[in-house]
Image (spheres, rainbow, N blue to C red):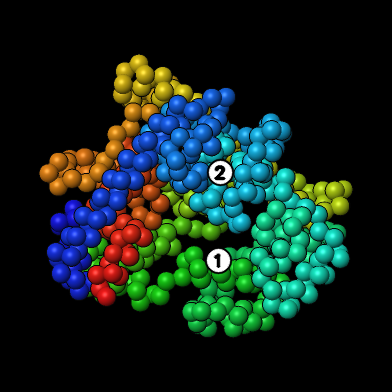
Amino acid sequence: MAQRLAPKLATKYKLPQSQLEEIFAYDEAERLKRQELSAKVAHAAQQRYSNCRCDWEAVAQELDMPLLECLDLYDASQSSISPRSFPKLVDWPDEELQLLQQFVNKNFNSMTTKEWRLVEIYMNVKQVDCSGAYTLISSKPMSPEVADLISKYREAGLKWKDIHSRFTIYSTHDSLRASYKLFTRKPHSMPETGKKYIKWTEAQTDRVRELIQKHYMPGSVKPVADIVKAEFPEKTENQVIGKIRQIVYRAYIPYSERDDVKRLVDKYGEDWDRIAQELQITTKHVQRIWAEYQSHSKHTSVWTENELTLLRKCVHKGLDFATISGQLGTKSAPSCRYKWRSLQARDIDWIEVGQKLNRTVSACKNAYFSTARSNRLQSSADHTEVVSREVCEQYHKHKCVDWAQISAAVGLSQRVCLEANEFNEGKSHWEYDPDAFSQEMADRMTQFIKSNYPYPIPVNYQAVSNYMWIDKNDCYKMAKLLDGEIDWTRELKERVVALRR
């Protein structure tokens, strides 16, 4: 793959092909070195694993490496260790909570996804559970005096890191900032008793769409919002802006582009490369325009009684909303999901609930849907546990996995099983080698992705990894290489800069 791409990249970056091949060789050597270290870390972690956790301090001491570097090099696919799940704070043992807080406070000043991944490896608890528990145990209440001081510091131009040095009671500057913003947030007033939100009618939506086509200029919704607000004075400003954004950002495509794409699809079929070349835009842009054109032409906003009946039946059968959207034919998957949620909450008197709990209506709704989402996540976690256990048993028995049998055993579709499984033992690695490259394997993976995740649906590489029984990261990298992309690592970029000087 590197040899095939070298001439194209040499022309693009104005480098001799020999120098670019030297860069590839250097990057390959660094990759092999990291892979060797990763295997050592995984083996040492497996040896030091006991009581549901790995003694990472002992691993770091054994390999004579910094603790965080060991955690970063650890590859879960080379180990049979599986992270635990503590979705609720009460599920955490006290000593584990104390260890979590000590580890984060000692090693990190601010938290990103990368840092939480290291915390997950260290604690052997899922990343989302670690971040949720840490947020709850590290949050401190904000007093009016502290809030006034912080406001003065912010007005003087001090950064949050500098302010945090004056209030060390907060574990990080992120938790200090979150507590301050929560304390200074303006409370929402309760709506008038009996006043209900009036939905936009179909005629009103069509009128707003006409005004958008006539007055909207890309970059700002404020000018057209003033015009719409003047025509519909009974609507609030937030309702108007929300409706405009719904139309503009989800369905707005210049009619000239849409018509051009439709004309060329009628002429050439779905030959996206040819259409993109003729319109002088990217292939993905063409596919996005066509997908949104089809959505705009087929989908309707009004729900009929037959559609609602079919929606209820499909949900009770356990179908996902993407499948339900395909069966309805006139509604998108997000529309089906939002409609089902609204049906669930339709019979609730939110004003009465808000008054009894002394909370705003929006706060009650948010708490309701947040709880519903937690229940869905718990259901998803249950699926993951059941599917992973079934896959583990079948793999240890036959040294292979038949997804049709897994689907029949757990009562879920094959795609759900592929996306839910977290058992990774025995997965092979797939590194590009020009002499041993298998085009058959590449075609098999490409066909699976196109069949199950057509554009614009994002690819679930966990499902691809389970289908191919190959490491997830290797599947991702190979898919990008087959798509003509290169993984520009920091070392590779530094090497390019050095050669161009």
- Is label 1 in a helix, a strand or a loop? helix
Q: In the depicted view, which residue is nearer to us: 185 or 77?
A: 77
Q: What residue is shown at x 55% (from left), y 48% (from top)? A: 116
Residue wearing tag 1 = 246
Q: For the residues marked 1 and 2, what is the alpha-carbon distance in whole angstroms?
A: 38 Å
Q: Position of residue 268 (x, y in %)?
A: 20, 64
- Total count of labels: 2
Please indicate whether residue 159 sits to the left or right of residue 270 in the image.
right
Residue extending furthest toward the left: 435
Residue 82 location, x and y as percent? 49, 31
Q: Quadrant of residue 400?
A: top left
Mark 1 vs 2, N-terminal side: 2
Tell me the mark number nearer the camera, choosing from 1 and 2.
2
Asked which quadrant contains residue 111, the reply is: bottom right
> Which residue is more in the foreground, 61 or 227?
61
Relative placement, left or right, of 359 versus 181 is: right
Mark 2 element type: helix
Which residue does the numbered mark 2 point to in the structure image?
Answer: 119
Q: Residues within 10 Å of mark 1 (few under 14, many from 20)?
A: few
State whether residue 84 appears in this view.
yes
Q: Nearer the viewer, residue 212 or 250?
A: 250
Q: Amino acid at mark 1?
A: Gln
> With respect to residue 474, does 422 lie above or below?
above
